[in-house]
Every structure is written in C-alpha cells, then in structure tokens.
Image (cartoon, coloured by chain):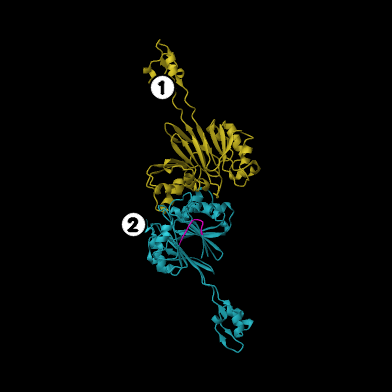
Chain colours: A cyan, B yellow
C-alpha cells in the first residue's frame, strides 16, 4: 500500500496548503479519498495518472472535503475518459453533482455511478479478490464516514525445498497450492502448513476524518497497520471540539492506542498553530508511533 | 480602473494555469468576474482582500467559470463576513449554490443575494453614482453573458483663472459647479463651458467570454477603452468554433476593430498551443493594440 497526501489542512485552501484529499494505492487500485478544492491540481503535481482513479470515497459533504469533485468529474470528461467512475458518499451527493453538470449541459460521456450512503452502521462498499473496503461511521456535524481498506490474505506459496524433503511428487503441487495436504512417497499425509510458506501479512489502512473523539470506532479499526485520524486542535483548544465535532491531537493518540494501530498519521490541522510539530508532540504522549501528514508526502504502508 | 487576471486559460486547471477569473477595481469597488476552481487561492496570491469583494459576476455555468464559487462563499463565512454578497449569474445558479450549502449544513451568516439572469437582451445589473454595469448577451453552448463596466462622467470642475478673467464673483461658484452659466460684473452671460474644465474621460471595460464570433455585441461595446475577448483557438483550428461556440484570435481582433476598442486583451487560451504569443500575432493582423492576459498580471486602464 502507498498513501499520498494531496491535502491535509482543515477549512479553506491557502497558497501553500490544501484541503483534505489523499490517494491510496493498493493492489493496482488507486482509491481517491475526499476531494477538496484544488485536488486535480494536486494530482498533477504528484504525477498521479487521472485515468487510474476509478473509485472516489467522500467522507462528508463539507466543502473542504468535496468541492474539488465537480471539477475533477468535468476534467475526466475533457480528457476523454470512457471507463466507469464510482463515487461513494453521503446521500445527496448525486443530486448536487447532477445539478452542476445539468446547468453546464456537461454530462459525462463515461458512466458515473453513485453509491449513496446513509447507514449508521459500518457497511461494505467495495470488494474484489484482493481488497475489501468498509465504512467507519464517524461523529461529526453532518453525516460522515471514515473508510477502512484491507488487503485480503494471499494464498500460501509452495515451499519447493520442503516438498523435496518430504518426497512429494510434482503432480501434487496444484493441490497443495490450493490448500490441501500432501502425501509422501511412503504414504504419509504431510500437513499443508509444512509444505507451504506463510503469505505476507495483509495490510490495512483506516481514514477517520472529520470526527469528534469516538471510541465506538475502535472495533472497526482494531489492529489496523496505519490509522489516519484527524487532529484539528491541540488540547489547549479542546473546548472547541464539542461544538465543531472535531478531535484534539491527544484524542487521536488515544484512539490509535485503543485500536492497537501500527502507526498514526495526523492531519486536518487547524491553521491557527505556528507549527504542526506541536500536534505530533501532543499525540505522542498517548501513542508513540506518530507521523505528520503533509501535502505531497507519500507513506509506504 | 485596474484589472487583475486571476486565471485566463480554458477548461481544466493545471499546475501553472488557472481557469477564468478576474478582478476589476473601479471607483472603490472590487468586482469579481467569473470564479473558476482555485480562484480563492489566486486571490490570496495576488494579495486581494476578500472582504472588499461585494459583487460577483458569473458569465455562464460551465465549470471552468464557476466551480470556485462554492468554496469562495464558504471561505467568506469562515472569515466571519457580515456584509452582503451579490451574485449575478444565469438562472439556476441560486439552486446549485443553495444545494451545496444545504448538504454541508453550512449556511452563510452574511446575506447572500442572487440576481438570476435569463434575458436575451442587454440589461442593467448594477448602478451607483459612479459606475454602471450591463450584460452583453453572448453566443455560447449555454446561456452566457459578458459584462460592460462603465464609469459615469464626473462633474466639470471650476476654472478659477477663467472666473477671474471674466470677472465672476465667488458667490456664483456653487451655481457654476452645478452646471449653470455665470454672469460677469458688467452683466454678460458667460457659458458654463468657459468657466469649467472638462472632466477626465470616463473609462470603460468589457468582458466577453465565452462566445462564438458575434457581431451583434459591437453596439454594446462601442468605443470601450479595453475589451477582453476570448480567443480559445487560432485560425488553424477555426473548424472547432462552430461546435464549441468559441472564437479564434483573429475573430477577437475583428470584434475589437469593429467596436473601435482602445485595447484588446486576449484570454481563454486552449492549452494545445506551444506559445500564447501566437494568439497575439494572429489578432494583430486585424487590430494593432493587442495584449495577452496572463495569470497574475495586472492592467491599468
């Protein structure tokens, strides 16, 4: 998995910071997560091929998370896109985009498929043979979902050396690769586990933004390799969290600790602070493995 | 008058070019004309104070001319704006913006006043004691207006030397300033024109984008000081104008010539050409005083 941060600041775009958007590359998919204004320019700056994006996940309908979407949809059309584009987002997103396209008499010439969300429980959004994506219901001022992306376990791979050791004939290899046990020349059953290698551990990534502190998400992100959790404020501004339904950096650290995450990425910074290093220092009091999202930065998971 | 080009390229925003938006400063007004995606960042780069913008004119509802508007409206709210914002644009713009704000539960806390346009004839949009703005109906794929901004004539100013020469008593000065004739000590009527200076010639600016070649606009922009006219294509691509309803650079030059404009600014360039200098060379075959719009460039009118 490779995560590219296109934008990770809260509220309005500025000359040098962008609102929320990120690209997750996993098993040959490029998933776009949120799409604040300026996302298409950030995609170009990060040299990400537009045509590879086939699924866009929108957390909620605040402008800093989706005002770049109409422009991106239009650009896909101008670039002559023909492949389907799937958009997952809160109920209402279809009407909003449709009105904008209708007003401009600019219907897409590629299939635009909306998957409108309204469930208060986690639901399955996407699944193929390698990847599975679920929503994470969050607690914000408007209906909001995070998303958890999980690689599926790969099949075990044949340990050729072990097959020789146990005297397994090549004619059994297909069977063993499919998970069955083997039979040695002298008629003994050899457990599949002895004849195959463990596959690499499947990776997982959870995106949680925007949200107030919400422990009910912990079971949904348990043991995730990387957790992106918003940290709009520091504890000095914790009083603002109740009204705005945002989190402090310390709260993000606590969620990472409770979830047993491998790593915590912070983002959605309020621009009131002098340095984003302050967010890292605060979260590390709860959870040690903290890194800071920055526009244009890439993380290998 | 001072014109600042925020963006002047057609279609999609790129790393180094922006879609249409410009700011016209005239008599203490800052009029924003069109608002492609990224306009608020361009405003910041050009150090234009957001609070000074009270009137936004949208030519038509293609994304490259208004997809920056929802974000700008939201940013005004986040900046604590309280003063009215007037938006002039095609019928439908109110519904589109309203839906986006409603979905995000992000109503403005300042009055947002829509002036929806649907007339096929030129109409008055704005007038105060110093400036007057009318629409210029254009010929594009969707309902589109250009805009002409005109300073009103200033009053004539008193020529103190002339009043002495003709022996005019100071008691008549208010009367003369209001346009009345004067009376000399020996009882002769002295024409107002002899006792006052001509005011500076009022300036005018016309914005025409997007449009096919359309001579019917000429009477509306007659003798304008500066004409901004789209030139999406060069004559080598003239065949594309019929379908896309855009103009070539040569056609823009012809309109400037027919209108007797003082100067022609070209913009809305297709990005297919190696150099925008080609647009200037072509237009100059029809009209000599051509300049090229460029993102971030300012023109004094």
Disc assigned to residue A239: 2
Is residue A13 toward the left or the right of residue A196 in the image? left
- The residue located at (41%, 61%) in the rendering is A281
Tell me where residue B9 appears, x and y as whole percent: 56, 45
Mark 1 belongs to chain: B
Q: Is residue A41 above or below residue B239?
A: below
Q: Which residue bears the numbered disc 1?
A: B177
Secondary structure beneath label 2: helix
Q: Main secondary structure of the magenta part?
A: loop
Is residue B256 toward the left or the right of residue B98 in the image? right
Residue B266: image quadrant is: top right
Residue B137 visible in rendering:
no
Q: Which residues are magenta?
A: A291-297
Disc assigned to residue B297: none
Q: Is residue A14 above or below residue B229?
A: below
Tell me where residue B237 appears, x and y as whole percent: 64, 44
Labels 1 and 2 touching (C-beta < 8 A)? no
Between A224 and B102, the residue placed more toward the observer is A224
- The residue located at (59%, 32%) in the rendering is B258
Residue A288: image quadrant is: bottom left
Q: Is residue A263 magenta?
A: no
Q: Is residue B162 above or below residue A227?
A: above
Between A87 and A48, the residue placed more toward the observer is A48
């Amino acid at each position: 998995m490779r995560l590219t941060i296109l934008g990770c600041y809260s509220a309005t775009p500025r000359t040098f910071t962008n609102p929320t958007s990120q690209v997750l590359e996993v098993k040959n998919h490029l998933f776009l997560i949120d799409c604040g204004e300026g996302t298409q320019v950030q995609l170009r700056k990060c040299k990400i091929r537009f045509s590879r994006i086939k699924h866009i996940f929108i957390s909620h309908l605040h402008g800093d998370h989706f005002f770049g979407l109409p422009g991106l949809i239009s650009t896909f059309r101008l670039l002559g896109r023909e492949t389907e584009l799937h958009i997952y987002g809160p109920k209402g997103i279809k009407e909003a985009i449709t009105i904008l396209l209708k007003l401009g008499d600019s219907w897409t010439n590629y299939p635009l498929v909306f998957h409108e969300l309204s469930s208060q429980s986690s639901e399955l959004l996407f699944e193929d043979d390698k990847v599975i994506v679920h929503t994470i219901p969050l607690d914000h001022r408007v209906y909001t979902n995070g998303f958890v992306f999980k690689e599926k376990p790969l099949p075990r791979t044949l340990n050729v050396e072990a097959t020789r050791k146990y005297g397994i004939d090549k004619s059994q290899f297909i069977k063993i690769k499919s998970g069955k046990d083997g039979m040695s020349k002298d008629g003994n059953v050899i457990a599949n586990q002895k004849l195959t290698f463990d596959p690499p551990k499947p990776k997982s990534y959870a995106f949680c933004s925007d949200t107030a502190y919400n422990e009910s998400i912990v079971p949904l992100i348990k043991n995730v390799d990387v957790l992106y959790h918003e940290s709009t404020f520091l504890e000095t501004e914790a009083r603002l969290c109740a009204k705005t339904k945002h989190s402090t950096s310390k709260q993000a650290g606590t969620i990472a600790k409770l979830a047993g995450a491998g790593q915590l990425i912070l983002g959605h910074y309020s621009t009131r602070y002098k340095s984003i290093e302050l967010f890292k220092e605060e979260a590390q009091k709860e959870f040690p493995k903290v890194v800071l999202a920055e526009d244009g930065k890439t993380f290998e998971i």
